[in-house]
Image (tube, rainbow, N blue to C red):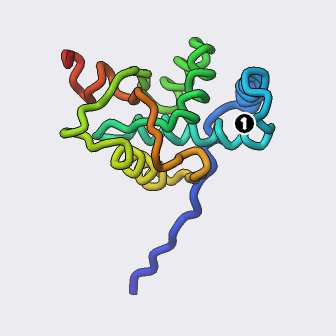
Amino acid sequence: MTVVQERPATDARTLLRADLRATLAANLLARFPDMTEDQADRGISQMLAFLAAGARSDVPLSPSPLVDDFWHAFLLHTKAYQEFCAETLGKFVHHQPGFLDKEEHGGGKALRARTVEAIAAAGYIVDLEFWPEVDIADCSQCHANCHNSPKHV
């Protein structure tokens, strides 16, 4: 008899040092005065889950516009972001603005579904408040707007 145990999903905020999480949260709260501390903390978690899933994915993923705001906040700390990518993800995750070809990668709903599924498959908690069904940001985690294709124009 084989027993299969499901592991509970991990909160991705544990991927980042507490002091850097606090700095990112403070920056976001200053930029978005209507955001609560809880939303800032949860959003950081979703951004980190997106980055971790994107680093493992063989296909492009895309953040929601809200998760993209959290990613932008992290990118402003270039040295810390670079170190996080190298030490935690094992590779640099590029922020590449632009549209993914709808024929090849599906539209916004397909990208959202693929991204949310990839986060869950990577073992992280998915907080659907940060992944609204209709909106996907105009960027992806892949280099040059097409995964594994740096010469794509």
| Residue 97, above or below 11 | above
Task: Judge by depth and name the residue closer to the eye, 38 or 12.
Answer: 38
| Quadrant of the image containing the C terminus | top left
| Residue 70, above or below 119 | above
Task: Judge by depth and name the residue closer to the eye, 30 or 91.
Answer: 30
Circle 1 SS class: helix
- Dot 1 amino acid type: Ala
Give percent across and percent down for residue 82: 52, 17
Left or right: 145, with 52 as reference point: left
Q: Residue at x 24, y 27 (%)?
A: 148
Left or right: 71, with 33 as reference point: left
Q: Residue at x 70, y 31 (%)?
A: 17
Q: Residue at x 65, y 39 (%)?
A: 43
| Residue 109, above or below 82 | below
| Quadrant of the image containing the N terminus | bottom left
Give percent across and percent down for residue 102: 25, 38
Give percent across and percent down for residue 87: 52, 27
Left or right: 30, with 101 as reference point: right
- Residue picked out by circle 1: 40
| Residue 20, above or below 47 | above
Q: Residue at x 50, y 38 (%)?
A: 64
State which quadrant residue 18 falls in.
top right
